[in-house]
Image: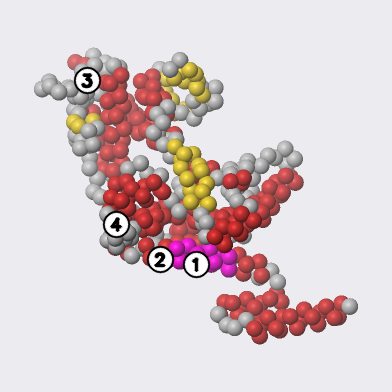
Amino acid sequence: MIHSVKTDKRCMATDFRKKISAPDIPVLFDDDGIFVEPSRYLMFCALNDDLALGSVKTYADHLQAFFKYLDTLKPPVEFNKKKYSWSDITDKHFFSYIRHKKEGGRSDKYIGQVITTVFQFYRWAEETGLLKKHVAMYDDEYTYSISAQLNKNKKWVWPYTPKPEHEFQPVPTSDDLEKVHTHAMESSDAVGFRDTLIMSLMERTARRMDVLQIKVEQIPSIDEIEDALETDTIFHIEVFGKGKVTRTLKITPELAEDIRDYIDNDRADIVAKIRKKDKTYKDPGKVFISSNYGVELSPNYVSSRLSGLMKEADVKGTGHRIRAKGLTDIVASHDGYDKDGKPMRQEDVLLLASEDAGHKNPKSLQAYLARSRAEGVASRIHAAGLSRALDDKIIKQRKTLSDYAQLQPVLDAIENGDDLSDSLLELLHKINNKGSEAI
């Protein structure tokens, strides 16, 4: 039975005669022990600077799914084997897997992803000499067990990989996200403010892992934030992003102010509460922590939490699509006119946006540029961001004020948009009278 186990911190890999630590890398096992060849491929991928461990885990899942299916196939009698070896695989096994999964109702998208991963494993095996003349990566007319062709990007692919129909994933609008922010703030005193800050960072194109890496020490002080508010200065926070490269998150002073407020109040209360219960507790130092245990949040928790909030707010899509809205906005922020008053070239807009968004390929943002131009996003971005920060502050203050019954007339006036003069004068009169009685 094929299964996978992650390496622990004791695992060491050799790289140019130097040993390096290699934890959390999937290793495949079969009935005979370590499934060596695909495990070596996964280790190769994990040590590749362009890949994140999350991608390697996905590759392991794909390889496991394919080889599990292979174990269910019985070779013909003339094959003289009880089961297929990984090196026996041909095009017919790929086609067999595709038919099996289609009959099981799996989408072309999923099937194509698995086949692509499995083919890339065999391509690697051919290139490294584990297989010889097995994959058709040669300029000749011979027939090989596994077909191959160069695509337009000059990369080897299996030519019969299922091509899914283009699927348009829902991208939340500004109004949609406004609903989610409001719902997050109003639905939970414990984590509502924290969740809306995470969403705000993702709207500025931060990935989950980027957000969860931010340390308390990286957030500016109150004095620094006040100076930035006066000069309209943007803060730059460095994180170790996808593809093992350092990227910079650009944070407005308004958002920095809210994060500092969370650190000094909600987060500080969490740390104090847990230290009171557990004298051995150590603050992890990351900005966003669990309200119950004070530990770092996991990426999966963030995804499920935000997806749940969107569903509760009756907004289509998942938490991952919040960043898609951010990418649309970041592209729109670079869209406009050049110094001669002419519309900026698409290539220039995409290049600038890709640098901000941490995307290596500017063309990957083409769809977001089309969407921003169709919806006229660019002119609304800054105003929407400032409005969001103000709305969050109002909701937070309203929840605080609601603890005091004598302030109810003021709350009602705020809710109805009425003039506050009479309500405030009445409140001050009550407070003065109460003070006189106390004396």
* Sequence order check, earlier mark of 3 and 1: 3
* Amino acid at the residue labelled 3: His
* Sequence order check, earlier mark of 1 and 4: 4
Vertically, is 267 above or below 296? Answer: below
The numbered dot on residue 344 is 4
Quadrant location of the C terminus in the rendered image: bottom right
Looking at the rendered structure, the secondary structure element under dot 2 is helix
Q: In which quadrant of the rendered view does residue 368 lie? A: bottom left
* Sequence order check, earlier mark of 3 and 2: 3
Q: Which residue sits at x=50%, y=27%?
A: 23
Q: Position of residue 53 (x, y in %)?
A: 44, 34
* Amino acid at the residue labelled 2: Arg
* Amino acid at the residue labelled 1: Ser
326 relative to 221 in the view: left or right = left
* Sequence order check, earlier mark of 4 and 2: 4
Residue numbers of the magenta segment: 382-395
139 relative to 253 in the view: left or right = left
Vertically, is 134 above or below 6? Answer: above
Q: Residue furthest right?
A: 439
Looking at the rendered structure, the secondary structure element under dot 4 is loop
Residue with the mark numbered 2: 380
Q: Which residue sits at x=68%, y=51%?
A: 268
The local crowd at label 1, few if under 14, some if 14 to 19, many if 20 or more residues have their Cα within 10 Å, is few
3D distance between C-alphas at marks 1 and 2: 11 Å
3D distance between C-alphas at marks 4 and 2: 18 Å
3D distance between C-alphas at marks 1 and 4: 28 Å
Question: Of discs 3 and 2, which sits in the foreground?
Answer: 2
226 relative to 17 in the view: left or right = right
User: Marks 1 and 2: CB-CB under 8 Å?
Assistant: no
3D distance between C-alphas at marks 3 and 2: 56 Å
Residue with the mark numbered 3: 134
